[in-house]
Amino acid sequence: MSPRAEMGIVLLGICALLVTTVFVGTRWREKSGGLGQVPPPAPEYARRIIALRDEDYDLVLRGGARVNGMGATWPFASLLVSRDQIELRVQILMPIRIARAEVIGLRRVRGLFSYGFKFRTESGRLDKVSFWLPGKAAHQLAELGWH
């Protein structure tokens, strides 16, 4: 086989790989709600979420976040916490409001240099949401009933 034919086969393989990657990525975004998006809460939980002002929250934490493939490092993500709900704000995304009744627990995760947590829910709506905490903030969350 000539070198040109071999090069053509290699290029054809690379093009097929790129097309497959784009197709799979597009289908993944359709199924997961889109890059950086999460599905809305179920109606029984959505009714429990109210719009609070920043000063109405008991605790404000700055850290890093990962939301369905989009990441933000400190200080571009903040977590506003009250006893009844949490609001995760990532600078370029819509805020994510989470009712306490929807969360069945927090799961700690270990990153390369820090610890974070993921929200555990029955529906799995927040499976692709994680927040990376500064210092001993997990203790402060536990005091407000988030553990």
Image: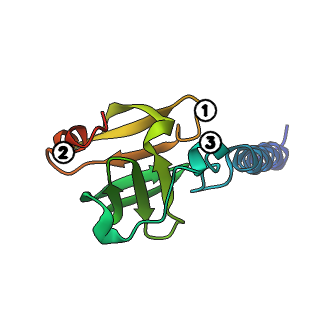
Alpha carbon of mark 1 to alpha carbon of mark 2: how far? 26 Å
Q: Earlier in the sequence, mark 1 or mark 2?
A: 1
Write down the quadrant of residue 62 in the picture. Answer: bottom left
Alpha carbon of mark 2 to alpha carbon of mark 3: how far? 27 Å
Alpha carbon of mark 1 to alpha carbon of mark 3: how far? 12 Å
**Disc 1: which residue:** 123
Q: Quick check: 133 above or below 109? A: below
Q: Residues within 10 Å of mark 3 (few under 14, many from 20)?
A: few
Q: Which mark is residue 140?
A: 2
Which residue: 71% across, 48% down? 25
**Disc 3: which residue:** 44
Q: Is 16 left, or right, of 37 in this rendering?
A: right
Q: Which mark is residue 54?
A: none
Q: Is 136 left, or right, of 99 in this rendering?
A: left
x%, y% of residue 146? Answer: 31, 38
Q: Quick check: 64 above or below 41? A: below
Q: Quick check: 122 above or below 72? A: above
> Depth-wise, is mark 1 or mark 3 nearer the camera?
3
x%, y% of residue 66? Answer: 44, 51
> What secondary structure is found at the residue carrying circle 1?
loop
Which residue: 61% across, 55% down? 35
- What's the amino acid at mark 3? Glu
